[in-house]
Amino acid sequence: MSNRDQDLDDLITEALDEEDRGLLGRYAQQPGFFAQVFSIFRGSLGWVMALVMLMLFVFFGFFVWTLWNFFQADDALMALRWGVGVLASVQIVLFLRGVIFQQILTNQVLREVKRLELQVVRAQHRDH
């Protein structure tokens, strides 16, 4: 984090009252990596992410199997065929991993938006 970002964070913290600082302190911390990974299985897209994770494990197993057979192949043609399977399964695994990490990123953005919504509602409530 740059000094400019830190200065902005300090200004925001100073503008908040004591109760809001407590809330910000409690919700400002990002959950750990494993908590974020397991959070993708909750919500309306939880079943889709479970299916993506299942397919990830299936294609990773396919990758290991084709890689093993690639190194066990006796002739070049069979090695080429197994090599195509290796490349295809690696591409699919990388794509599915990207889908999972994009969902984690989406959850992080939604968490921040909800935190901002909470601050706006609390500020409006104080003004009335």
Image (spheres, rainbow, N blue to C red):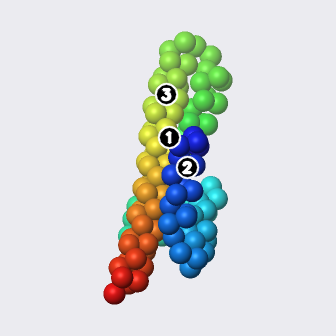
Residue 55 in the image, given as x and y percentages of width and height? 48, 51
In this figure, which residue is indicated by the disc labeled 3?
87
- What residue is shown with label 1? 93
- Tell me where residue 29 appears, x and y as whole percent: 61, 62
Could one spot residue 39 in this view of the protein? no
Spot occupied by residue 38 in the image (x, y as percentages of width and height): 57, 63
Judge depth for marks 1 and 2 and give the one in front: 2
* Residue in the picture at 55% in, 19% down: 79
Name the amino acid, label 2.
Asp
Other residues around mark 2 within 10 Å, as few (<14) / some (14–19) / many (≥20): few
Q: Which of marks 1 and 3 is nearer the N terminus?
A: 3
In percent of width and height, residue 8 lies at 51, 52
- The reply to whether callout 3 and callout 2 are in contact (CB within 8 Å) is no
Label 1 CA crowd tier, 10 Å (few <14, some 14–19, many 20+): many
Judging depth in this view, the residue of 80 and 86 nearest the camera is 86
Residue at the spot x=58%, y=13% of the render?
Answer: 75
Q: Which residue was labeled with disc 2?
A: 7
Distance between mark 3 and mark 2 Cα atoms: 47 Å
Crowding at dot 3, Cα within 10 Å, few <14 / some 14-19 / many 20+, comes out as some
Q: Which amino acid does label 3 sit on?
A: Leu
Q: Is residue 9 visible?
A: yes
SS at badge 2: helix
Q: Measuring 60% from the left and 29% from the top, which residue is drawn there?
A: 67
Q: Which residue is drawn at 61% across and 71% down?
A: 26
Q: Which amino acid does label 1 sit on?
A: Val
Mark 1 or mark 2: name the one nearer the start of the chain: 2
Relative side of 114 to 80, left or right: left
Vertical relation: 74 (above or below) 22: above
Quarter of the image with the C terminus in it: bottom left
Q: Nearer the viewer, mark 3 or mark 2?
A: 2
Q: Quadrant of the N terminus?
A: top right
Marks 1 and 2 sit apart, C-alpha to C-alpha, by 41 Å
